[in-house]
Image: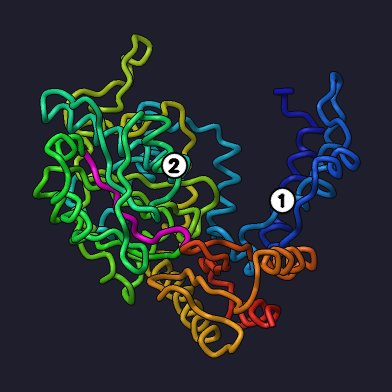
Amino acid sequence: MHSYTQATAALARGLADLCLDRLAMRAPLDNTRSPEELLARAGQTVTATGIGQDEALRLWEDVLAPACLSTDNPRYLSFIPAAPTKAAAAFDMLVGASSVYAGSWLEGAGAVFAENQALGWLASLAGLPEGAGGVFVQGGTVGNLSALVAARAAAQHRRGGRPPRWTVLLTDETHSSVKHALESVMDVDVVLLPGDERGRLTGVALRDWLATASPEQRESVFAVVATAGSTNLGAVDDIAGIADVATEQGWWLHVDGAYGGAGLAAPSVRDRYAGIERADSFIVDPHKWLFAPYDCCALLYRDPVLARAAHTQRAGYLDPVTVEGDHGDWNPSDFAIQLTRRARGLPFWFSLAVHGTQAYAEAVEATLCTARRGRELIDAADHLRLLVEPDLSVLIFERIGWSETDYAEWSGRLLAAGTAFVTPTRHQGRVCTRFAIVNPQTTEADLALVLDSMR
């Protein structure tokens, strides 16, 4: 299995050809399949003697790959799509073939150096001070969890102990993974504060809570989470107002920009992030709106020393890579909950290095322009109603008069026909739908086609 033979060479060429074909084509939308359908077509693929490389490759190409939706299709408008650049996708192939371990500087110095330059650009976009830094992790869930673990450790060290219970302040629009990480993983209490008319957490809401909270409740808080582009609505919280209160109270301010943080690259919306430069930690997922392949979340700390104190793992076998002090080699595994890690930031770095940051700014601006045109189409349509004023590139709206069943049937028809992938959602208890536009190849005509299908 580990020798490079003529058969291996043939397999590699076949896979390379498939990769080149995929890079060259418009991403197919494809469709999902049931377990029964896939079992009937693919059969049992894992056997004692193997099915051979030709058959395994055929099954992937003909049966399994078409049962995976392509998130980079321009009409994949649900959840938060992805649209990796060709350079990033191509370099990801090399990363996969290279067997680079990127958890320590000792073993992956070149990869870590490159990743840190990409992280440096993101830190500069957010206005974080010189010396800020962090690590690329799997996704926003791991990024948020790692940041909040560091926040709790810093609070416990600063206070010289811990209260009976720890608490973090959120809203209903905070990503569901944050609440889950706090309650189910960290065993931390969550207080959900009311958002404003667009679901945004504000400094006023924090002050209102403080005015009624008991001394014990106030003492239990160690962090507040602001959202820079909520998943469902695309709204950016009142980060400056939140930062004011967090500073006064000595709370850690974490900003979840998994989707919306990419908007920092666009001058037209940069003002909406006022206050983000005061964050203690910040995440953004390049695999969402910064055109990297899955999976890639950038986790940044204002003071990486605090994160290192929380996350560095100690063991005899790790002595050769353990770094003491504030300077010296940079071990990515010291800044998040994982030890083993793929160099998942490299495809993002490579694309940045190839195209330059200005190209990224222009691509993000292009998607914002498409979103504005989509909003105009919704406003002009008698059968549609915009539900929330958009901050970024998410449009949430309703088809007037439709029931939950109507939305579900319409969504299913679009996908079955290969037209688009748009799913229902809910806002303030009512069923509706939304567009999440992060692909520069999505056009006004694509949006018009979907909106016309709702007549």
In depth, the one of 329 and 76 nearer the eye is: 76
Q: Is residue 430 left or right of residue 227?
A: right
Is 228 contained in the magenta span? yes
SS at mark 2 in the image: helix
Disc 1 is placed on an element classified as loop
Residue 210 highlighted magenta (yes or no): no
Q: Residue at x 59, y 89 (%)?
A: 382
Write down the residue under mark 1. Answer: 68
Rendering quarter of residue 242: bottom left
254 sits left or right of 89 in the view: left
* 273 left or right, relative to 378: left
Percent from the top left, x then y, of residue 5? 77, 29
Read off the magenta span: 222-232
Quadrant position of the N terminus in the picture: top right
| Residue drawn at the location 58% of the way across and 43% of the way down | 94
Callout 1, which amino acid? Cys
The crowd level at tag 2 (other Cα within 10 Å; few <14, some 14-19, many 20+) is some
Q: Quadrant of residue 216?
A: top left
Q: Is residue 345 visible?
A: no
Q: Which residue is mark 2?
A: 141
For the point 55% across and 86% down, the residue is 377
Q: Please state, as top left, top right, bottom left or bottom right, where the C terminus lies in the image.
A: bottom right
